[in-house]
Image (tube, rainbow, N blue to C red):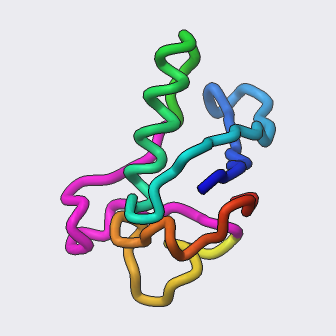
Amino acid sequence: MNIKLRIWRQANAQAEGKLVEYQLNDVSANMSFLEMMDVLNEQLISKGEAPVAFDHDCREGICGMCGLMINGVAHGPQKATATCQLHMRTFRSGDTI
C-alpha cells in the first residue's frame, strides 16, 4: 500500500514548526503503525535527514507509551488500541494520514 504522511516537525521549542509530507510506498498492511514509522525513519536517516521522534517502549500494547495523535485522534481510529497494535490494514492505500 502507498501512504502519504503529514507529520508536524519542529526542531525544538523555540523553532517554528511546520507540517511536512512524506510518501511511503509498498507499506505492508500487516505492519503496525510504529513499524511503518520505523521504515520512514530508516529512509530519512539514509538521506541524512533527522528521524521523526516518537515515544514507544514495549511495542506489545501493554505500556501505553506509544500515544501518537493520528488524524487528530489519540492512538488512531481503533478504539482501545495502542499505536503499536494498530495495523496498517486499518488504512487504505492512497490515504493521507
Q: Main secondary structure of the magenta part?
A: loop
Residue 31, position as x, y percentages in the image:
39, 59
- Residue in the picture at 26% in, 73% down: 61
- Residue in the picture at 33% in, 61% down: 65
**Residue 85 to residue 33: above or below:** below
**Residue 69 to residue 45: above or below:** below
Most extreme residue toward the bottom is 79
Front in this rendered view, residue 80 or 40: 40
Front in this rendered view, residue 7 or 86: 86
**Residue 41 to residue 65: above or below:** above
Whether residue 57 is in magenta: the answer is yes
If the image is split into quadrants, where does the C terminus sit?
bottom right
Residue range (magenta): 53-71
Whether residue 87 is in magenta: the answer is no
Residue 22, position as x, y percentages in the image:
70, 38
If the image is split into quadrants, where does the N terminus sit?
bottom right
Front in this rendered view, residue 15 or 36: 36
Say left or right for 27 vs 92. left
Residue 89, position as x, y percentages in the image:
50, 71
Residue 88, position as x, y percentages in the image:
50, 65
**Residue 5 to residue 64: above or below:** above
- Residue in the picture at 67% in, 33% down: 10
- Residue in the picture at 69% in, 70% down: 72
Say left or right for 29 vs 18. left
